Image (cartoon, rainbow, N blue to C red):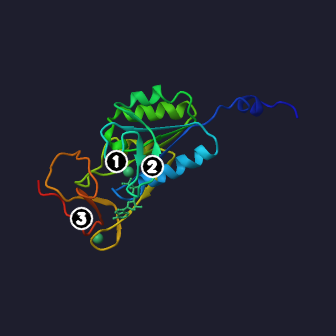
Amino acid sequence: MPETEFHKRNHVRKEVGQIEVICGSMFSGKTEELIRRLRRAQIAKQKVAIFKPRIDKRYSENDIVSHSEQKIPCTVVDTATEIILFSSNADVIGIDEAQFFDNNLVEVVEKLAAQGKRVLVAGLDTDYRAIPFEPMPQLLAIAEYITKTLAVCMKCGAPANRTQRITHDSSRVVVGGEEAYEARCRNCYEPPGD
Ligand code: ADP
Ligand code: MG
Ligand code: ZN
């Protein structure tokens, strides 16, 4: 077949990276879904690098752990920039608890995708006041694929997209589990009175 202009332009195409965001309330299965995708990549012998921010020490120092006790080993990082340093050999990158990173994560994720990598990011889309939790809105805007996960409302059983804080703390970041939060639907969610 003669080499056309089309072939000349396209046969040197490099790997196309992509950004996948998994978001929802607490207990909605974000971490389970992230682990599921990362395990499949590992089974397929892809090079996988997995990260979480140091702040999340709830269940393990060296693993990402779901509320259903599924886990996968990860590297703990202090800043988003460290993810670049540890990802040079990876084809697939997983990041949990993305809402605990600063906005620099957006640039980091873009850079990794531009290098042809598949970047999976999981995090809370809203905080305990039901306000969008940066940098998740920015990540959602630049992602190729978005998955919204829902929990089961602890009051009425409806699909739940909100995180109810059940303690009286008014700082935005309070790392906790079932003792501090529960999943609620739009109707049963009660805005904190602070
Ligand atoms: P996330 O990362 O979104 O906080 P996880 O993947 O860690 O969620 O955990 C999901 C698991 O949480 C469920 O499979 C279930 O075992 C448990 N769970 C606890 N409370 C709820 C709830 N209200 N609705 C759904 N699952 C819940
Ligand atoms: Mg989680
Ligand atoms: Zn409800």
Q: Are marks 2 and 3 in contact (CB under 8 Å)?
A: no
On the question of residue 127 being in view, the answer is: yes
Point out residue 2 in the picture as x, y percentages from the top left corner. Answer: 87, 31
Residue 136's disc is: none
Kindly state the secondary structure of the residue where label 3 is placed: loop
Q: Is mark 3 within 8 Å of ligand 3?
A: yes
Q: Nearer the viewer, residue 2 or 102?
A: 102
Residue 189's disc is: 3
Residue 59's disc is: 1
Q: What residue lies at 25% left-to-right and 57% top-to-bottom?
A: 181
Side (left or right) of 10 relative to 113: right
Q: Earlier in the sequence, mark 2 or mark 3?
A: 2
Point out residue 119 in the picture as x, y percentages from the top left corner. Answer: 50, 40
Point out residue 26 in the picture as x, y percentages from the top left corner. Answer: 33, 56
How far apart in space, not on screen, are marks 2 and 3 (Cα)? 29 Å
Q: Earlier in the sequence, mark 1 or mark 3?
A: 1
Q: Are marks 1 and 2 in contact (CB under 8 Å)?
A: yes
How far apart in space, not on screen, are marks 1 and 2 (Cα)? 10 Å
Q: Is residue 17 above or below residue 32?
A: above
- Residue type at mark 3: give it: Tyr
**Residue that numbered label 2 is attached to:** 71
Front disc: 2 or 3: 2
Q: What residue lies at 52% left-to-right and 52% top-to-bottom?
A: 36
- Residue type at mark 1: give it: Tyr
Side (left or right) of 159 relative to 117: left
